[in-house]
Image (cartoon, grey):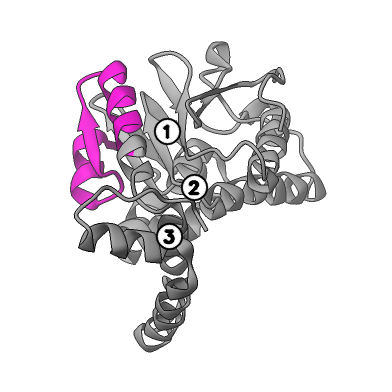
């Protein structure tokens, strides 16, 4: 994996095996366009298929103070045909699905506006931290559109169907305090620096646990959300029993019995 590759619409930094992806179109409020989605897809595929670098966790954020991702690039979309829109929607959904299915934890660190596609990108991460000035919303109906990168599906799972319908039908914005009460985000911070510092602390704390167990827990939770409770319990039981064949399970339980810190290998 080439961590020194240069991108036009984002920056990718890795330090001590923790990665930060920064959406970097500040003059356009970090608005999503086809180029950015293509670069994100390429990067995430590289991360997902990498067997050598072993990134432990990722923070997704936006450049500057005004916007995480203010939405999709409307100028680019305004002249699209249905076929063009299908291609764009497919690309956007591929990117959000890649974020959602990465084996490592991904934290969205939202500063300023996270509207439309920006909200959808944030929701595809494992959870969302936000600054007090963050603003969320799916305002597509105000433009004669609907969410196309997963918003109609993920928002309902995060805040409940009726809340999601009210938000999507009205297109209204959510400030950070209301988003916190609804469960869309999990923590708020006074400023971006404090948020980024805490997000990195969280990833480092998670990395002290078995990476195999964290990855499996993520997989089971993501897959189980669309199952009945009975089906979900069967899935959990299979994975719970399966992890007993792992080196991490043996190391973790032995370390507990021996009253020492575990040394996990992720296998």
Residue at mark 1: 114
Viewer-closest of 238 and 245: 245
**Image quadrant where one finds the N terminus:** top right
Determine contact: label 1, label 3, CB under 8 Å. Answer: no
Disc 1 from disc 2: Cα separation: 23 Å
Q: Point out which mark residue 104 bears.
A: 2
Which label lies toward us, 1 or 2?
A: 2
Q: Is residue 175 left or right of residue 67?
A: left
Let me know if residue 153 appears in the view: yes
Residue 59 found in image quarter? top left
Tell me the magenta residue range. Answer: 174-202
Q: Which mark is in front, 1 or 3?
A: 3
Element at label 1 = strand
Where does residue 60 sit, x and y in percent of width and height? 47, 32
Q: Say which label, 1 or 3, has the lower sequence index.
A: 1
Q: Determine the image quadrant of residue 88.
A: top right
- Residue 177 lies within the magenta run: yes
Which one is closest to the eye, mark 3 or mark 2?
3
Relative to 211, is 191 on the left or the right? left
Q: Nearer the viewer, residue 149 or 199?
A: 199
Q: How many marks?
A: 3
N-term mark: 3 or 2:
2
Query: Tag 3: Cα neighbours inside 10 Å, few (<14), some, or many (≥20)?
Result: many
Secondary structure under tag 3 reads: helix
Residue with the mark numbered 3: 248
| Image location of residue 215, percent across then percent down | 47, 57
> Is residue 98 highlighted in magenta?
no
Q: Nearer the viewer, residue 207 or 225?
A: 207
Helix, strand or loop for disc 2: loop
Of the numbered discs 1 and 2, the one sitting upstream in the chain is: 2
């Amino acid at each position: 994996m080439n961590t020194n590759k240069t991108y036009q619409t984002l920056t990718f930094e890795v330090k001590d095996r923790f990665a930060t992806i920064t959406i970097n179109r500040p003059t356009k409020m970090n608005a999503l366009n086809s180029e950015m989605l293509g670069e994100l897809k390429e990067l995430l595929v590289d991360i997902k298929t990498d067997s050598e670098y072993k990134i432990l966790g990722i923070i997704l954020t936006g450049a500057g103070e005004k916007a995480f991702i203010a939405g999709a690039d409307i100028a680019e979309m305004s002249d699209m045909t249905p076929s063009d829109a299908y291609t764009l929607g497919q690309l956007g959904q591929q990117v959000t699905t890649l974020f959602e299915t990465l084996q490592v934890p991904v934290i969205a660190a939202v500063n300023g506006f996270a509207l439309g596609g920006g909200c959808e990108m944030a929701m595809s991460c494992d959870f969302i931290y936000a600054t007090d000035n963050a603003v969320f919303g799916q305002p597509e109906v105000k433009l004669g559109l609907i969410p196309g990168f997963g918003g109609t599906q993920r928002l309902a799972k995060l805040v409940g169907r009726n809340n999601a319908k009210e938000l999507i039908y009205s297109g209204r914005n959510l400030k950070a305090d209301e988003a916190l009460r609804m469960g869309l985000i999990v923590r708020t911070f006074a400023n971006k620096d404090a948020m980024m510092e805490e997000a990195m602390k969280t990833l480092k704390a998670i990395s002290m646990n078995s990476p195999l167990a964290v990855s499996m827990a993520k997989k089971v939770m993501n897959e189980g959300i669309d199952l009945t409770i009975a089906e979900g319990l069967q899935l959990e039981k299979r994975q719970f029993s399966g992890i007993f064949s792992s080196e991490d399970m043996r190391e973790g339980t032995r370390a507990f019995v021996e009253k020492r810190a575990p040394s996990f290998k992720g296998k």
